[in-house]
């Protein structure tokens, strides 16, 4: 099976590639990624030179790049996106371009190439924000996105479904909750807080710290995507979550405890604009129909993740220091 992975140099895409190449002998991966600030080939350096893995530097919005990468693909696993809510508040245009237009360019190419499956990796943020006692999101929850990021992802979900209903493209979609784990870019909550503490800095907790997210280890997400691509029904959507709702404050205190720090290290800062209060996923459909459920407990997964960041300082210090930018300029020429 040849899988075109888009955005494979990012956090979840890279973990998915590791997962697939480690698990299956007979899988070939083509990774199409244009290496934005979030793409990092160091995430995949152990596969460089492996005949089952090929990297193509290219943009999902560019028809030529996409048709070159699509050659011979049986399956598309589409991760590439602008993914950070705070950045979408500062500059929505790149989100509209990559997440919506890029997805449509890929869909066209997938249709032409007659792929057997186009899997679209989406987020629970498309469903909006829950109150404390409202039921969790499921596959029937109406869309109600509220940030430029979630609005662009919601839009791409609709376009993907439209290609199924209109042209018969064999698609599946997963809407997943917040991921954490190795290789997560240190602008997101968990890696930012862990790396700040190592650097002796404070951790910026937004607002009252009582916003809730449902956390899932990234390798559980990789497994869910694999299961959906192999056994999921064409045209279907699956909600994927960790059944692990935590307030940001709880997570902050857990990280402080693991790292032997105290609340002196917390800096309460102004809230994010339009900050969604609570996300929570009811993952009973994927459990019932496909037998998937998370393997990691949040406690063990978080400890392991903190350890990964402590053992891989070189990886994130390059990113945080700006050396990373220089490295890619040198490697690929031109600015990122
Ligand atoms: P990320 O920002 O770490 O990685 C995104 C990758 O896409 C990077 O390698 C980047 O270089 C690449 N990319 C961006 N624009 C591109 C373009 N125009 N052409 C080619 N490549 C491009 O993101 P992530 O956290 O790994 O998220 C991956 C996917 O999973 C996204 O679609 C996101 O919406 C979805 N998702 C993320 C989470 C989460 O908690 N991080 C949860 C649910 C769903
Ligand atoms: P984030 O990792 O950006 O994921 P998302 O916004 O997609 O859920 O943020 C997770 C939660 O942590 C969210 O409620 C915002 C909060 N947060 C902070 O309190 N401080 C920070 O510095 C960051 C990046 C996030």
Image (spheres, helix red, strand yellow):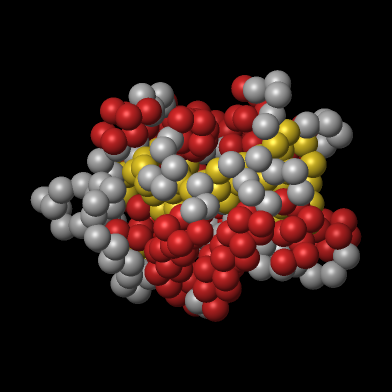
Going 58% across and 59% down the picture, which residue do you hit? 107
Q: Quadrant of residue 33?
A: bottom right
Q: Residue furthest left?
A: 133
Residue 23 visible, this angle: yes
Q: How many marks?
A: 0
103 is higher (above) or lower (below) than 139 = below
Q: What x and y, as percent, mark residue 336?
A: 75, 67
Which quadrant of the frame does ligand 1 lie within?
bottom right
Q: Quadrant of residue 254?
A: top left
Q: Quadrant of residue 272?
A: bottom left
Going 72% across and 59% down the picture, which residue do you hit? 66
Task: Indicate left or right for 313 with 213 as reference.
Answer: right
Pick whichever, 144 or 205, lies toward us: 144
Q: What x and y, as percent, mark residue 293?
A: 36, 27
Task: Indicate left or right for 194 with 5 as reference.
Answer: left
Q: Residue furthest front?
A: 167
144 is higher (above) or lower (below) than 280 = below
Residue 323 visible, this angle: no
Task: Indicate left or right for 201 with 279 as reference.
Answer: right
100 is higher (above) or lower (below) than 15 = below
Going 74% across and 58% down the picture, which residue do you hit? 67
Q: What x and y, as percent, mark residue 123?
A: 41, 53
139 is higher (above) or lower (below) than 221 = below
Going 24% across and 60% down the picture, which residue do you hit? 142
Location of the N terminus by quadrant is top right
Q: What x and y, as percent, mark residue 46?
A: 77, 32
Task: Indicate left or right for 147 with 73 as reference.
Answer: left
């Amino acid at each position: 099976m040849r899988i075109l992975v888009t955005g494979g140099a990012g956090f979840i895409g890279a973990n998915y590639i590791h997962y697939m190449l480690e698990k299956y002998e007979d899988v070939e991966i083509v990774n199409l990624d244009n290496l934005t600030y979030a793409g990092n080939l160091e995430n995949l350096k152990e596969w460089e030179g492996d005949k089952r893995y090929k990297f193509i530097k290219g943009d999902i919005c560019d028809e030529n790049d996409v048709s070159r990468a699509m050659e011979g693909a049986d399956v598309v696993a589409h991760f590439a996106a602008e993914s950070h809510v705070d950045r979408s508040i500062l500059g929505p245009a790149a989100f509209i371009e990559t997440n919506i237009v890029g997805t449509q360019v890929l869909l066209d190419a997938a249709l032409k190439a007659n792929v057997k499956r186009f899997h679209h990796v989406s987020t629970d943020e498309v469903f909006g924000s829950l109150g404390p006692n409202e039921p969790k999101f499921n596959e029937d929850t109406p869309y109600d996105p509220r940030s430029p990021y979630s609005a662009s992802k919601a839009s791409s979900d609709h376009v993907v479904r439209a290609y199924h209903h209109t042209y018969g493209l064999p698609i599946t979609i997963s809407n997943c909750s917040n991921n954490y784990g190795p290789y997560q870019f240190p602008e997101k909550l968990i890696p930012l807080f862990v790396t700040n503490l190592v650097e002796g800095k404070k951790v910026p907790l937004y607002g009252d710290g009582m916003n809730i997210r449902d956390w899932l280890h990234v390798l559980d997400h990789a497994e869910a995507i694999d299961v959906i691509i192999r056994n999921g029904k064409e045209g279907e959507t699956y909600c994927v979550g960790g059944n692990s709702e935590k307030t940001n404050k709880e997570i902050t205190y857990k990280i402080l405890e693991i790292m032997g720090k105290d609340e002196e290290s917390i800096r309460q800062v102004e809230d994010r604009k339009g900050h969604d209060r609570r996300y929570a996923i009811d993952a009973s459909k994927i459990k019932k129909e496909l037998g998937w459920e998370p393997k990691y407990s949040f406690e063990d997964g978080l400890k392991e993740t903190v350890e990964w960041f402590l053992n891989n300082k070189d990886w994130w210090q390059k990113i945080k220091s700006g050396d990373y930018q220089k490295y890619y300029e040198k490697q690929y020429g031109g600015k990122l």
